Amino acid sequence: MAAFLVWILLLLPYVAISSTASHGVRLELTHADDRGGYVGAERVRRAADRSHRRVNGFLGAIEGPSSTARLGIDGAGAGGAEASVHASTATYLVDIAIGTPPLPLTAVLDTGSDLIWTQCDAPCRRCFPQPAPLYAPARSATYANVSCRSPMCQALQSPWSRCSPPDTGCAYYFSYGDGTSTDGVLATETFTLGSDTAVRGVAFGCGTENLGSTDNSSGLVGMGRGPLSLVSQLGVTRFSYCFTPFNATAASPLFLGSSARLSSAAKTTPFVPSPSGGARRRSSYYYLSLEGITVGDTLLPIDPAVFRLTPMGDGGVIIDSGTTFTALEESAFVALARALASRVRLPLASGAHLGLSLCFAAASPEAVEVPRLVLHFDGADMELRRESYVVEDRSAGVACLGMVSARGMSVLGSMQQQNTHILYDLERGILSFEPAKCGEL
């Protein structure tokens, strides 16, 4: 009961802003590589590299302090608890605004983490290049520091809070496996979503010493399951997105609140409860129950335990916006690759230049016929279209499986979600999906 009361207290500061977004908000997501002008094989290679780094970051959170990808938190900006964050593996960017008057801001959208943060000129002791002017708290009428003992600071630090008098602010320090880092204080501010939805009192990290980059953006918007994520602070009970095709330049819609809705024909699968043991970081992830994979008409001989989440947080399958190519636990990936190779019946080719393992040589890669591929989730089957799992490089004459192998966990990536409207129902604890023409929603 005591733990329940503490959780309620943590949520109280955010309830006041929930009504603002209850009417629903639509935002537009752009692919990070669109803004960088990456196309063709280079775009595929970046996606494969990003997927591997992203999964390694997730595993870093699970394995704890020994990992190279981790997050250190304490009141003084050194030591403390550790968990993984992934700003350097951006896939989708969202345009919002911060402060009063509003300053346009481009941020990474991340369903695998919670904290919202941006670079700040307060002053900024060290900042990486970004496409827009730095946010300056002194120029905003609605900026406010968060006290060390506030519930919001406790949500960031608990159960490793180092706050004690004479500390007054809530300091944080995030470090990344690739050398990117952000150091600053937790504060609250007014954020503008879309053209006219202003939300007051949103807690965010104001970073004044930052290294690295976040792929043509100024920070990050966490959409995870923890109390500091945007969806938790807004108090919305659901959100959805629909990713346009991997190589398309059209924006992908993101819906918050009541504007997130699917038809009655949508399929539904429950979220798997977050693990009770291990690193706190894992409570941010959206876990699913993947029960098997079918190629053609054959259910692959994969031990269901391969996809199972343990009480300590080992294994499992998460759905993620930042991982492009689905990462399958190694034994499952091998079974899938063998099944595809036996059915496609074309010469194998190297996909090293793309960062992909299974490729076929073909004069016309777009004409390569592949069998149906179905992911069997608890209560719902997701049948992948050809364009959702085949990557083509016409100049090299190869058609490849757009998935990668991983050890330790599996991740459903954004390419396999493309042209599928995905809805996260946080109140009911379910994920729903249905085919859609995302560019027309």
Image (spheres, rainbow, N blue to C red):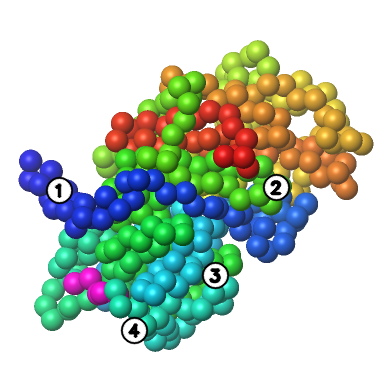
Which residue is nearer to you in this view: 349 or 189? Answer: 189
Residue 135 on image: x %, y % = 43, 77
Mark 3 to mark 4: distance in Å? 24 Å
Number of residues whose C-alpha sits closer than 10 Å to that of mark 2, classed few (under 14), some (14–19) or many (20 or more)? few
- Nearest to the eye among marks 4 and 1: give it: 4
Q: Is residue 271 in the magenta section? A: no
**Over which residues does the magenta segment extend?**
143-147
Residue under pointer 4: 138
Say which label, 4 or 1, has the lower sequence index.
1
Residue 38 on image: x %, y % = 72, 59
Number of residues whose C-alpha sits closer than 10 Å to that of mark 3, classed few (under 14), some (14–19) or many (20 or more)? many
State yes or no: discs 3 and 4 in contact (Cβ < 8 Å). no
Say which label, 1 or 2, has the lower sequence index.
1
- Against 278, residue 90 (above or below) is below
Disc 4, SS? helix
- Nearest to the eye among marks 1 and 3: give it: 1
Residue under pointer 1: 8
Question: Residue at image x 46%, y 41%?
Answer: 240
Q: Quadrant of the N terminus?
A: top left
As drawn, the label of residue 213 is 3
Disc 3, SS? loop
